Image: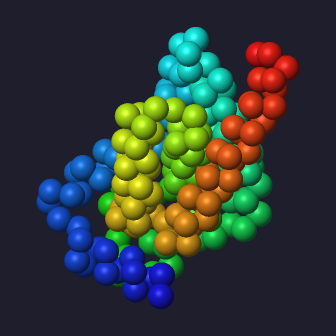
Amino acid sequence: MEAQILLWIQNNLRNDVLTPFLKVVTMLGNKGWFFILVSLILLCLPKTRKTGLACALSLILHLLAVNLCLKPLIFRARPYDVIPGLVNIIEKQSDASFPSGHAAAAFAVTTVLLLRADKRLSIPMLVLSVIIAFSRLYVGVHYPTDVLAGVLIGVLFGVISVWIVDKIGKKKI
């Protein structure tokens, strides 16, 4: 079923307008640089320091779980290596497919922002995160379950990070 979804996206949604846009959007998740930048900006501002700390913590937890534990342990092949006819439209990825680190990072930070930040920041970040997650399917580098698992992991670590920072915050940061 996952192969059918990816091939449907490739055959019905890929086009000359969406492709350049989604290639740029998917790059926002590369190495987590965009979400690290968001975290650093929030950390630098006194009013958002705790939110920035929770964002940074969520990224650290996601990195440990996704890149150091789950990807090497499960080592799922990329869909473009397995599904006949599926063409990835970005460079080949050097790590395993499950779970999506892009989706996990995006939703880890977005969950913190939804719980702690103004809706003028958190809602656009949610929209961006959904587009990043979809972009991983669109460019052909993840299965739908990779992305879904990444989203769930990101949400989990976002919630845990807010809880930890709130507990520490009671002791005064």
**Measured along the vertical axis of the image, is residue 121 above or below residue 151?**
above
Residue at x 22% of width, y 77% of height: 12
Residue at x 35% of width, y 71% of height: 87
Q: For this view, does 124 lie left or right of residue 13?
A: right
Q: For this view, does 80 lie left or right of residue 53?
A: left
Horizontal and vertical percent for residue 7? 35, 80
Horizontal and vertical percent for residue 97? 58, 64
Residue 90, by quadrant, is: bottom left
For the question of whether residue 144 can be seen, the reply is: yes
Kindly give the residue lying farthest to the left in the view shown: 16
Pick the front one: 148 or 135: 148
Kindly give the residue lying farthest to the right in the view shown: 171
**The C terminus: image quadrant:** top right
Pick the front one: 147 or 108: 108
Horizontal and vertical percent for residue 155? 62, 52
Residue at x 43% of width, y 48% of height: 126
